[in-house]
Amino acid sequence: MIARLRGRDEIVFFAFLSRVHAGLAGAWWLLIIVRGVLPAVLTILIGELVGAVEQSLPLAEPLAATGTVFVLIQLLAPVHAQMCGNLGDRLADRLHTLLGEATSLPSGLAHLESRRLAERLAVAQDFNLGISGPPMSISIGLITGGLVEFVAGLAQTAVLFTYHRWAALLVAGAWLSTHWLLRESSSWDRDTDDVLAAQRTAEYTYRLAVDAPAAKELRIFGLSEWTVARFAAERRKLIDLRRQATRLRRRPIRWGIVVLVVANGLMFWSLAAEASSGAVSTGQAVMFAQATLGTAALAFGGINWALPPTAESVATALSLREVMREAGELPSEGRSAEGLPSAGIHLRDLSFHYPNDARPVFNGLDLTIEAGRSLAVVGVNGAGKTTLVKLLCRLYDPTGGAVEVDGVDIREFDLESWRGRIAAVFQDFLRYHMPLRDNVAPLGASEEVIVAALAEAGALDMVDLDTILARGYEGGTDLSGGQWQRVALARALAAVRLGAGVVILDEPTAQLDIRGEAEIFERILAATRGMTTILISHRFSTVRHADRICVLEEGRVAELGTHAELMAAGGRYHSLYTLQASRFTAVNGDAVKTEEAGA
């Protein structure tokens, strides 16, 4: 029972506040109590003031005390509001850190490509977006108001105890039952598939609308209104799901009204009777009547509507770190990969399927990549080229077979040691909103290394090393797609100069023209000569220069050999190469693109 209570989202939320900032959380709780008690103190003082007037006693002290408490009530509210904003901002900052750790610290990718975890992540991020509830800084203020009212209701109940115990229990019980009934009538299940799917879609379309990467396509294809409409539709779906769920729970409200009428009617009838008989004075009657009205705060205070989504976001964010670690973490042994491979990389009887998809990408793949030589991998879309890169980088582990480096399963290597041997350029490489030097070497490197890498990539004279590569910053600029691709290549070449021995290029020149591609590939081969290089590309004018070419089909090696050998064999590679070559026209010995299709 106790363990179940401690596991409730609300308890987890309140416990976490003290971990965010113990002093601020303590002051926040203290002001909740003080602000809740002060209205009851004011009720008592008003009763004494009326009594003093009734008995013609001096009014200076009761007036001063009443005024002081009233001013405190007014002053503490804005002070508490500022504190709530501060605590909410600190809490949001801590949650951002937790989510950043949960998503980025696991060494693999499975946790980021899980549908269920993606939905839970959308719930956890809602504290910032406010799609199903208010943002954190506002939520803390709403939660605070509810707690202050609840304490105020309890304090007013304590005043009623000085009248009659039965009266305090009757009125407080009536309002508490109403509070429970109101809460029951407004609660809804946020963890259903419909709710999670609607929230995730709403968040996604919101990001499409406000983030820059999608801006061009949304405008060119006339999708701006469509995107906003989709967001609005999914947001309305969330509201409708909540309305439908709460509508089914509204019957108890009628019983709540009956209980309130009876309980408060008895209380005021008793108070009127005793005031008429002289059993209580006028001042006491005023005090107890005001306390009876003040006890109503029990119904509207406490755990209000803002707490469940806020507590759920916090609890989900706290739990995601462990859950994502379990889903995405890859075991790491202590063996060093320094200087490897010296013989080669062997994909032995390799099988793999993604966690959310039982269909195999590879089923018995066998391929040897010789150390110190270049291998190009080609194939139609869906052949498994990018998945092969993920396995070589050990972003996933195979579901069967092994990736062996000099005869050793890469799972036996220290993960950081193996990845330290790899320099990679991916299709979706990052464009850091940072200076050029940090885009080339984010963890730092000498200027000599950075300049040499830029020169090898043909990107040396684009902008100054300290220019921020993003508009919107002072002195910042943006680059063309081809220029960015050269920067990404320079990043990999800098890693080679810093010790990497395996170079993986996944469509490294997709945004360059034919001449630019040929130039860059010649630079890459020159810079990585003697290293193990794996090139993924759909352009056969590029891959023909590799030492060997592998044709992947349906997760298996269909053909393997040099360009000349594969052309002479007249098989699949010959067909693909001929098809693509027919769509280029030779003019004065230079390749000029007339029509291109990916192979």
Image (cartoon, grey):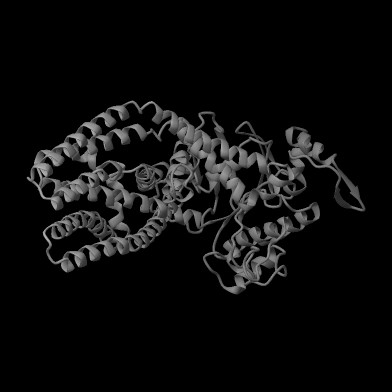
Q: Position of residue 519 (x, y in %)?
A: 76, 58
Side of 507 relative to 418 (left or right): right
Q: Position of residue 324 (x, y in %)?
A: 41, 44
Q: Nearer the viewer, residue 124 or 137?
A: 137
Side of 175 relative to 517 (left or right): left
- Residue at 56% from the left image edge and 57% from the top image edge: 501
Q: Position of residue 585 (x, y in %)?
A: 89, 45
Q: Position of residue 375 (x, y in %)?
A: 65, 47
Q: Nearer the viewer, residue 591 or 229?
A: 229
Residue 212 visible? The answer is yes
Q: Nearer the viewer, residue 201 or 172?
A: 172
- Residue at 81% from the left image edge and 37% from the top image edge: 578
Give the position of the C terminus as an image quadrant: top right
Side of 303 relative to 234 (left or right): left
- Image quarter of residue 193: top left
Side of 152 relative to 460 (left or right): left
- Image quarter of residue 93: bottom left
Q: Number of callouts in the render? A: 0
Is 558 located above or below residue 308 in the figure? Answer: above
Residue 385 visible? The answer is no
Is 242 located above or below residue 450 in the figure? Answer: above
- Residue at 32% from the left image edge and 36% from the top image edge: 183
- Image quarter of residue 464: bottom right
- Residue at 61% from the left image edge and 42% from the top image edge: 228
Q: List the single residue furthest toward the left.
A: 279
Give the position of the N terminus as an image quadrant: top left
